[in-house]
Image: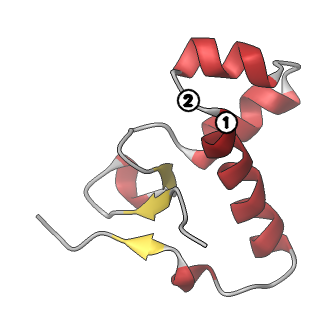
């Protein structure tokens, strides 16, 4: 399965971000925790439902102890 999560040390200090954006996984989860729904996040951040779900899956995998190194890591630019 292709991931929409990228870790690039030159983007947002290496925090996991949604691919081709500067939006962090942390921001997406914060929006959800703050009560925003998927539609709200799609409008506010310009993300798709699949991108939002990728952020959730990324964190769920991390909590379960899965290796996050399997997610895309961009080479230095």
Could you tell me which secondary element the residue under label 2 belongs to?
Answer: loop
Q: Quadrant of residue 67?
A: bottom right
Q: Position of residue 12 (x, y in %)?
A: 38, 47
Image point 68% across, 21% down: which residue? 41
In the displayed structure image, the side of residue 41 where residue 37 appears, left or right: right
Marks 1 and 2 in Cβ contact (< 8 Å) = yes
Circle number at residue 47: 2
In front of the other: 11 or 4: 4
Q: Is residue 32 above or below residue 45?
A: below
**Residue toward you, 1 or 61:** 1
Q: Quadrant of residue 75?
A: bottom left
Residue 68 position, x and y percent, is: 61, 79
Asked whether the viewer can see residue 26, the reply is no
Question: How many numbered marks are there?
Answer: 2
Dot 2 crowding, Cα within 10 Å, few <14, some 14–19, many 20+? some
Question: Residue furthest toward the front?
Answer: 1
Quadrant including the N terminus:
bottom right
Disc nearest the viewer among 1 and 2: 2
Q: CA distance from mark 1 to mark 2?
A: 10 Å
The residue sitting at 84% across, 22% down in the picture is 34
Residue 38 - label: none
Seen from this angle, which residue lies furthest left?
77
Label disc, if present, on residue 28 of the rendered structure: 1
Q: Is residue 60 above or below residue 44?
A: below
């Amino acid at each position: 399965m292709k991931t929409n999560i990228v870790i690039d040390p030159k983007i947002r200090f290496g925090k996991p971000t949604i691919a081709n954006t500067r939006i962090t996984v942390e921001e997406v989860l914060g929006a959800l925790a703050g009560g925003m729904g998927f539609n709200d996040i799609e409008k506010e951040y310009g993300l798709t439902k699949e991108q939002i779900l990728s952020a959730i899956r990324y964190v769920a995998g991390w909590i379960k102890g899965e290796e996050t190194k399997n997610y895309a890591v961009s080479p230095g630019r």
